[in-house]
Amino acid sequence: MPTNKTFTMIKPDAVRDGHSGSIIKMIEAAGFRVVAMKKTQLTPELAGKFYEVHKERPFYNDLCKYMSSGPIVPIILEKENAVTDFRTLIGATNPANAEEGTIRKLYAKSMEANAIHGSDSDENAEIEGNFFFAHIEQF
């Protein structure tokens, strides 16, 4: 059953390039409400835990190195049909294939440095949000 929450994370490249504010503005303009948000930096170990599902994939070590290379902005969002609507807003993983006007088309540099993460399911949105935020922080 679909929920009304999803998880996103503005990635190190977009934070480093000063795009966090513009990305958050786009998210809110699309009707999403920020439930929880903070700026933090993952250690390689924490990045490894977050991306553990990809541990056997060839890109895993590079992904962990990249995601711990600078500050990130994890965010829990709320909106009806949140996961699906947010995946549409961010665009394809490969920015070359992303639709015009999507976050990745505007701010991504490459498949890896694609500016933003978006949960791919309601279950993962809950798991990922709980990785970064205690229940008391989610209001």
Image (cartoon, rainbow, N blue to C red):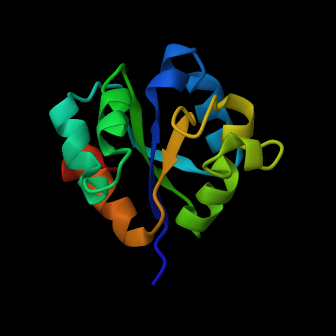
In this orientation, which residue lies closer to the viewer: 120 or 110?
A: 110
Most distant residue in the left direction: 45
> Residue 28 location, x and y as percent?
63, 42
In this orientation, which residue lies closer to the viewer: 53 or 15?
A: 53
> Residue 21 location, x and y as percent?
59, 23
> Residue 72 location, x and y as percent?
39, 28
Whether residue 46 is visible: yes
Q: How many marks?
A: 0
- Residue located at (28% from left, 59% from top): 53
- Residue located at (36% from left, 64% from top): 124
45 up-or-down from 35: above or below: above
In this orientation, which residue lies closer to the viewer: 94 or 41?
A: 94
- Viewport quadrant of the N terminus: bottom left
Tell whether 131 sits left or right of 98. Answer: left
Tell whether 9 sits left or right of 105. Answer: left
Tell whether 44 sits left or right of 106. Answer: left
Most distant residue in the top direction: 17
Most distant residue in the front direction: 58
- Residue located at (61% from left, 58% from top): 87
- Residue located at (61% from left, 34% from top): 110
Whether residue 38 is visible: no
100 up-or-down from 65: above or below: below
Most distant residue in the bottom direction: 1
> Residue 86 location, x and y as percent?
60, 56
